[in-house]
Amino acid sequence: MKQYDIVIIGGGIHGVGIAQAAAVKGYSVLLLEQTELAAGTSSKSSKLIHGGLRYLESGQIKLVKESLRERAILLKIAPGMVKPVKFYLPIYKKTSRPAFYIAIGLLLYTLLGKFAAYTRFHFVPKKQWPSLSGLEIKGLKHVFQYWDAQTNDKNLTEAVMSSAIDFGADIACPAEFNGADKAPSGYEIHYTQDHEKIICQATVLINTAGPWVNLVLDKIRPAAVKREMDLVQGAHVIIKQPAPKGVFYTEAPEDKRAIFMMPWQGQTLIGTTESLFTGNPADVRPTEKEIEYLLRITRHYFPNWQTEEVARFAGLRVLPRSKSSAFSRPRETVFHQDKNHPNLFSIYGGKLTGYRATAEKMIKKIKHLLPAPKNKYSKETDDLLLTQVTDKNN
Ligand SMILES: Cc1cc2nc3c(=O)[nH]c(=O)nc-3n(C[C@H](O)[C@H](O)[C@H](O)COP(=O)(O)OP(=O)(O)OC[C@H]3O[C@@H](n4cnc5c(N)ncnc54)[C@H](O)[C@@H]3O)c2cc1C
């Protein structure tokens, strides 16, 4: 039976990020993915590598600071895959947040980003408004322009896994995790690949199954404690409209939610929604109501756009349960552990943007459970980790 230091369940951005960090440090690691890499939320996101300007409003300063730092790192280490993009934030007579309020938020964004590249903002002069990709000018009072970044979430996930493999990680895909039994030195893990039932052992078991996180915990013996959570569906639609000149950050007039109109592969991507989801995560699909909502807001701000639908998709946010609305709930990554299972770690929530930071935190949490890694935690290994994300699709 094969023995690993670490087995990871789930080949989304968190699983591959941890596989890469673990392999760079010299741990033996196997990643199990049931369908294909990025089959879950990691190919259904808004594809933004962003500081999360809107999280400032709910006081998530630590998250914004970390996200801005990660954005800066990814722009540096994956320049072919993570690209800066202009964001336009229009303020109308009827916009709920006044211009000075947005300006304070953007100033804070600049400060938290330590005045680094792509942290500055400015007002777009009125004479340039007619060139803003057809944005409705009636009632417009100000337009802010600031920066964030875009990526191809699926390609990024694949690139990080490819780097993990280069550093020695193993992957079984498609391979379904069927269950794990606690053993004296970790876990005996059962999975199925090509109709074959395989057993391996690992000292540490990491559950990065995203929306399936609690379904995976149901398969741990003896039973593991689960965290109460909600799955919140977010839909996107791609329309025929040629790509706008940046991302437009608008406010839905009916419920004041943030809706983004983004350039995407020559067309326009619009998202997103928030509605509670119950059922099998594999069955998540956008509803007609969600698509109509997104198109209605698009037509409100861009009355002349071609809103013919090209494609639609939906993903699931994992939000630990609380009384507040999905929009205002903390978006920080939750590392979950159970005192009866000290060698089992699960991730709830998180962001594509923060995958590297999450992986580093996870390695720090499991370090004491494993023999000293072959490669010491050093400047060199950190640098290695920072240079290896390249898009093999191009
Ligand atoms: C609508 C939406 C928009 C978003 N936009 C952004 C954004 O613009 N920027 C940003 O930074 N973040 C964004 N996020 C957040 C980000 O996309 C997610 O936090 C991230 O993709 C989650 O990755 P993950 O690895 O935890 O889960 P997932 O990507 O869902 O991966 C889990 C994997 O586990 C596998 N799995 C499950 N069960 C098993 C099993 N039994 N055996 C083997 N494999 C299994 C699944 O097949 C899946 O591939 C968005 C999220 C949503 C929902």
Image: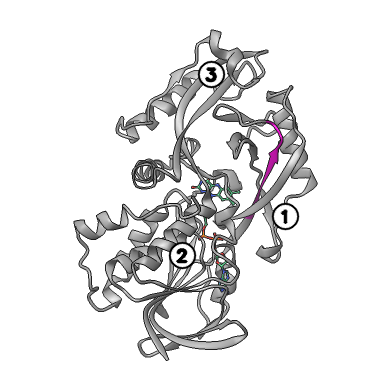
Residue 109 visible in rendering: yes
Residue bearing mark 3: 143
Disc 1 from disc 2: Cα separation: 23 Å
Above-or-below relation of 135 to 15? above
Measured from the top left, where is residue 191 in percent x and y?
A: 54, 82
Measured from the top left, where is residue 279 in percent x and y?
A: 71, 65
Above-or-below relation of 323 to 222? above
Residue bearing mark 2: 15
Which residue type carries mark 1? Arg
How does the figure colour the protein chain or chains?
Answer: one colour
**Res 106 label:** none
Which residue type carries mark 2? Gly
Disc 3 from disc 1: Cα separation: 34 Å
Report whether 12 appears left or right of 360. Answer: right
Above-or-below relation of 215 to 185? above
Question: Which residues are drawn in magenta?
Answer: 232-241
- Residue found at the very far top of the displayed protein: 127
Q: Earlier in the sequence, mark 1 or mark 2?
A: 2
Between 259 and 253, the one lying in front of the other is: 259
Residue bearing mark 1: 285
Which picture quadrant has residue 104? top left
Secondary structure of residue under mark 3: strand
Q: Please report the residue visible at 68 percent of the width from the left and 50 percent of the height from the top.
A: 313
Q: Please report the residue visible at 46 percent of the width from the left and 65 percent of the height from the top.
A: 15
Which picture quadrant has residue 195? bottom right
Measured from the top left, where is residue 306 in percent x and y?
A: 74, 29
Between 309 and 206, the one lying in front of the other is: 309
Instruction: State which image quarter holds ligand 1.
Output: bottom right
Q: Is label 2's Cβ within 8 Å of ligand 1?
A: yes
- Magenta stretch: includes residue 308: no
Disc 2 from disc 3: Cα separation: 39 Å
Magenta region's main secondary structure?
strand
